[in-house]
Amino acid sequence: MTLRLPKAELPAELAANMIEQFGAVPENVEVVWHSPHVAQDSLEFGGKVGAWAAADASLKSFAHMAVAAQVGCSWCLDVGYFLAQNEKLDLAKASQVPRWRTSEVFTPLERDVMEYAEAMTDTPMTVTDEQYASLLDRLGPAAMVELTTVIAYVNLATRVNVANGVSSQGFSDACEIPLATRPEASGVASTA
């Protein structure tokens, strides 16, 4: 995929901070920087979302990557693997998220979270009362609200990236695991 909008030049301090954090300046930030207010607010809210701690980090990570795989955001999958490694999450599982339905590495709860993430991503949404109640019973109200909001935020971020033509930037090259691709039968082309 080719960027649909050229990269804007970031302030030197922000670029240096991004390089320190990720090893490179994320292209999605450079593209959105054409509107610095939008970019700054997105970065700030994304940082706040990342700091929430009511729901398990692995569950949120798997939900994020399930949305990214469904939407087709290779950048989000790429950085998701990178962040999973940095956060010391289970990389064998993270690598299998795009094919979670056929992979045998996930627990029933993890599968239900990814199914919920996909149901929230469907247009129109396909979340059922039973699905929501089952997760609420196992996660509790605070974690359920957090997980739901994380999934909604990820839908925003992935769709902005895909619409702007942002694709994988090579962050996951630091991971020493083979990355799975989403099965073609799902209706979405391979994204990893």
Image (cartoon, rainbow, N blue to C red):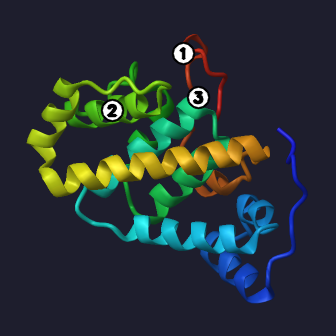
* Residue at figure coordinates x 37%, y 23% from the top left: 126
* Rendered position, 10 above or below 92: below
The residue carrying pointer 1 sits among few (fewer than 14), some (14 to 19) or many (20 or more) residues within 10 Å by Cα, namely few
Kind of residue at disc 3: Thr
Question: Under tag 3, what secondary structure?
Answer: loop
Q: Which residue is located at x 53 percent, y 52 percent?
A: 80
Residue 12, visible in the rendered structure: yes
Figure quadrant of the C terminus? top right
Left or right: 162, with 180 as reference point = right
- Which label belongs to residue 87? none
| Kind of residue at disc 1 | Ser
Q: Label 2 is placed on what type of residue? A: Tyr
Horizontal side of 165 relative to 75 (left or right) equals: right
Q: Position of residue 167 (x, y in %)?
A: 74, 45
> Please, what secondary structure does the residue beneath circle 2 have?
helix
| Residue carrying label 1 | 186
Q: Quadrant of residue 8?
A: bottom right
Q: Is residue 144 left or right of residue 12?
A: left
Which residue matches tag 3? 181
Whichever of labels 2 and 1 marks the residue nearer the N terminus, that label is: 2
Foreground disc of the pair 2, 1: 2
Quadrant into which the N terminus falls: top right
Quick check: can you spot residue 61? no
Distance from disc 3 to disc 1, alpha carbons, whole Å, reads 11 Å
Q: Earlier in the sequence, mark 3 or mark 2?
A: 2
Mark 2 Cα-neighbour bin, 10 Å: few <14, some 14–19, many ≥20:
many
Which residue is disc 2 drawn over?
116
Q: Position of residue 156 (x, y in %)?
A: 55, 48
Q: Tell me where residue 142 sits by quadrant.
A: bottom left
Q: Position of residue 143 (x, y in %)?
A: 21, 54
